[in-house]
Image: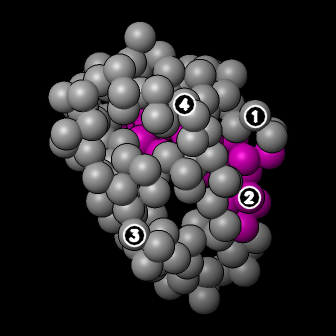
């Protein structure tokens, strides 16, 4: 992953000038909401988790740390309140948290097409999910997904 990130930054100096990494402290805050992050996603956030994502050409979705953390934090707080009242909900949320990880938040849509990593598979396929259209595979791996944005 580090080689991929170095290549992206070298090929796109305008993006490299805008992008900043995420601190270890921020990653720990995110992991309190999501559980352990996959190493490739953690490396991505550490190198370029803030700034410049409009250059990805992936529509209105927000891939930066701040938008993703805000969504995870809000969901984690809601889940705590709801889980206290409903043990079945707690089990379902735990299964979902183990199965997928939000990496792109579609904040501007009435039917959001959020982007997730499939945590159950080692290559970390990337997919979008929405109420209207269901699950749609975007890339067979996180690495390929990141490459697509800069080709």
Give the residue number, with chain letter if any, for mark 1.
Answer: 123
**Left or right placement of residue 5 versus residue 110 in this view:** right
Of label 2 and label 4, which has the lower sequence position? 4
Give the residue number, with chain letter if any, for mark 2.
Answer: 98
How far from the left and from the top, in percent, is residue 116? 55, 41
Q: Nearer the viewer, mark 2 or mark 1?
A: 1
* Nearer the observer, 51 or 34: 51
> How did the renderer colour the structure?
one colour
Of label 2 and label 3, which has the lower sequence position? 3
Q: Residue sitting at 45 percent across and 64 percent down? A: 72
Vertical placement of residue 8 versus 17, above or below: above
Q: Residues within 10 Å of mark 1 (few under 14, many from 20)?
A: some
How far from the left and from the top, in percent, is residue 81? 50, 84
Dot label at residue 4: 4
Residue numbers of the magenta segment? 93-120
Of label 3 and label 4, which has the lower sequence position? 4
Of label 1 and label 3, which has the lower sequence position? 3
| CB under 8 Å between discs 2 and 4 | no
> How much space separates mark 3 and mark 4, taking CA atoms?
20 Å
């Amino acid at each position: 992953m580090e080689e991929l990130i170095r290549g992206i930054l070298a090929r796109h100096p305008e993006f490299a000038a805008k992008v900043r990494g995420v601190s270890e402290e921020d990653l720990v805050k995110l992991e309190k909401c999501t559980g352990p992050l996959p190493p490739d996603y953690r490396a991505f956030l550490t190198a370029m988790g803030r700034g410049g994502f409009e250059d990805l050409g992936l529509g209105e979705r927000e891939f930066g740390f701040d938008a993703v953390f805000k969504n995870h934090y809000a969901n984690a707080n809601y889940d705590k309140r709801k889980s206290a009242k409903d043990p079945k909900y707690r089990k379902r949320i735990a299964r979902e948290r183990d199965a997928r990880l939000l990496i792109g938040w579609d904040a501007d849509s009435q039917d959001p097409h959020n982007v997730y990593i499939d945590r159950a598979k080692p290559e970390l396929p990337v997919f979008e999910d929405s109420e209207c259209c269901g699950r749609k595979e975007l890339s067979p791996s996180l690495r390929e997904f990141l490459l697509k944005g800069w080709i």
